[in-house]
Image (tube, helix red, strand yellow):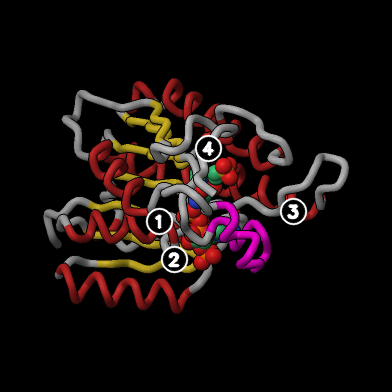
């Protein structure tokens, strides 16, 4: 048994999730990391245990698999159940096509991951928060939740849903003393665009040309700040862009 705080981060094999796990681990938190790529989770677990002397529990599951999410979260070892913070970060965009051209399988994957996955994980962790009479859900939305941009259609819709779900959680879980924070990042250079453009590195690189996009560490710093406020203080909604980006539409690029 330790007295360390515990954070559960979904999608910790890359990008924001990995940076968040590292940031909290470096400050002495025990960390539950999840994702589909088991070898990456194991490597990150070894790295954090060795560097920071904290405990790490890697859990391999697909957030779209409702039964697997339920089973793995119900089976959490007792000394991992006192979770302080859940970060619903796992998510993706697939394709950037007009509504008439977009691939409906891509739509399904985004809806299943970004919306349903977030719901499954939230419900899986909730009983542990309820048992303790406190908790904090941090949902990673996007500037795409705030504005719909051309060819963003269903990705933007899923992030609007994340915003709506965050508001709903905040209202419905108020009496349970559960904080809910939505962080909405703008463009950040992670594996996001490689995934979106299905491995096309050149297409991905174009997204970040001519300006200094957010880095994963920037969002980790913000998540850490938000999670470490006094018990009576909750940041509800945060939009964070790099200095070159005004909103989902306007980025000043020097190319
Ligand atoms: P990355 O591609 O770098 O990381 C995405 C993470 O999500 C990976 O760890 C991946 O793990 C996990 N993931 C994806 N699908 C699933 C799934 N079905 N089950 C479990 N885990 C899954 O992208 P980012 O770090 O940039 O993205 C993180 C979040 O931030 C997403 O929700 C994204 O929409 C959002 N966001 C990103 C922005 C950006 O510009 N980068 C800006 C605004 C928001 P694995 O593949 O191992 O399962
Ligand atoms: C990711 C950023 O601009 O591609 O949510 O929507 S963007």
Q: Quadrant of residue 178?
A: top left
Image disc number at residue 233: none
Q: Which residue is mark 1?
A: 17
Please name the residue that numbered disc 3 is placed on.
106
Q: CA distance from mark 4 to mark 3?
A: 26 Å
Report crowding for label 1: few under 14, some 14 to 19, many 20 or more residues within 10 A (C-alpha). many
Q: Residue at x 43, y 58 (%)?
A: 15
Q: Circle 4 sits on which residue?
A: 251
Disc 2 Cβ-to-ligand 1 distance below 8 Å: yes
Q: Specify the quadrant of the image occupied by residue 161.
A: top right
Please provide the residue range marked out in magenta: 192-207
Do the CB atoms of the residues marked 1 and 2 lie less than 8 Å apart? yes
Kindly indicate whether the residue at mark 2 contacts the one at mark 3 (C-beta within 8 angstroms): no
Q: Nearer the viewer, mark 4 or mark 1?
A: 4
Residue neighbourhood size for the residue with mark 4, other residues' Cα within 10 Å, grouped as few (<14), some (14–19), many (≥20)? some
**For residue 202: magenta?**
yes
Q: Earlier in the sequence, mark 4 or mark 3?
A: 3
Q: Which residue matches tag 2?
A: 13
Left or right: where 229 falls relative to 177: left
């Amino acid at each position: 048994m330790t007295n360390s705080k515990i954070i559960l981060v979904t999608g910790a094999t890359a990008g924001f999730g990995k940076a968040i796990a590292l940031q909290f681990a470096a400050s002495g938190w025990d960390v539950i990391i999840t994702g589909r790529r088991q070898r990456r989770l194991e490597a990150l677990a070894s790295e954090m245990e060795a560097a920071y002397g904290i405990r790490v529990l890697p859990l391999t599951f697909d957030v779209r698999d409702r039964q697997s999410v339920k089973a793995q979260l119900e089976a959490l070892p007792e000394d991992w159940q006192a979770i302080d913070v859940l970060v619903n970060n796992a998510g993706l965009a697939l394709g950037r096509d007009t509504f008439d051209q977009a691939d409906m399988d891509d739509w399904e994957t985004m809806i299943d991951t970004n919306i349903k996955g977030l719901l499954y994980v939230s419900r899986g962790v909730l009983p542990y928060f309820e048992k303790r009479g406190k908790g904090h859900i941090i949902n990673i939305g996007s500037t795409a939740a705030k504005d719909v941009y051309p060819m963003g259609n269903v990705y933007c819709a899923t992030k609007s849903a994340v915003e709506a779900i965050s508001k709903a959680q905040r209202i419905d879980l108020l009496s349970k003393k559960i904080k809910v924070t939505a962080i909405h990042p703008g463009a950040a250079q992670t594996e996001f665009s490689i995934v979106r453009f299905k491995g096309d590195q050149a297409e991905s690189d174009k997204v970040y040309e001519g300006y200094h996009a957010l880095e994963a560490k920037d969002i980790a710093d913000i998540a850490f700040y938000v999670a470490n406020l006094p018990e009576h203080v909750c940041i509800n909604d945060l939009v964070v862009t790099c200095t070159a980006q005004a909103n989902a539409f306007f980025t000043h690029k020097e190319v």
